[in-house]
Amino acid sequence: MTPAARTQDCNRAQASVRLSQARAFLDVAELVGAEDDELANPNVSAALAVLAGIAAADAACCAALGQRSRGQDHRQAIQLVTEVGDDGRALARALGRLLDVKDGAHYGMVFVSSQQAKAAIRHATTLVDGAARLLSR
């Protein structure tokens, strides 16, 4: 039996803060993941993209639902993200794909390829853009 997902109430102001954090994580992920750059490191880039996606998921949920996931397992947030509106399924899919690389990126025992890091940045961008649309309504 899956435990009930824990949530925390939040508001649009908090959504705005989480979106700002998501954008910052994404900006740094793109910088660190730049090709032919001495700072390029796919694991770090992917890890930052995952953080961007989680923050953006929080922002989307706070903006649309007034609550965000607070469970120990980030995957519990996927179901909540599906409920944010028309883009919910696409945003949830992007979050799921980011979480697929989370352990390898964050804990460094598995090499994250440059292609995986670029895909993580694309998924994070999907979430950041979706959260921004929800917050602009």
Image: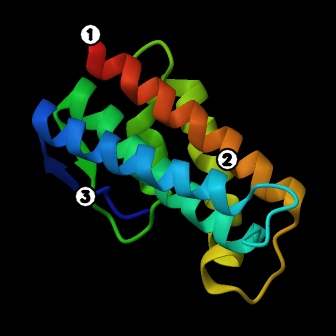
Residue 11 visible from this viewpoint: no
Q: Give the image quarter of residue 64.
A: top left
The CA distance from mark 3 to mark 2 is 27 Å
Image location of residue 66, percent across then percent down: 16, 33
Callout 3: helix, strand or loop? loop
Please give the residue where the numbered disc 2 appears in the rendered image: 121
The three-letter code of the residue at mark 2 reads: Ile
Residue 137: image tag = 1
Residue 6: image tag = 3
The three-letter code of the residue at mark 3 reads: Arg
The CA distance from mark 3 to mark 1 is 26 Å
The CA distance from mark 1 to mark 2 is 25 Å
User: In the rendered view, does 114 fall on the left or right side of 98?
Assistant: right
The single residue placed furthest to the bottom in the displayed view is 109
Compared to 103, does 114 lie above or below? above
Q: Give the image quarter of residue 81.
A: top left
Which class describes the residues within 10 Å of circle 2: few (<14), some (14-19), or many (20+)? many
User: Of label 3 and label 1, which has the lower sequence position?
Assistant: 3
- Who is closer to the viewer here, 95 or 79? 95
Quadrant of the snapshot with the N terminus: bottom left
The three-letter code of the residue at mark 1 reads: Arg
Image location of residue 103, percent across then percent down: 64, 76
Residue at coordinates 53% horizontally, 49% vertically from top-left?
26
Quadrant of the snapshot with the C terminus: top left
Residue 80 visible from this viewpoint: yes
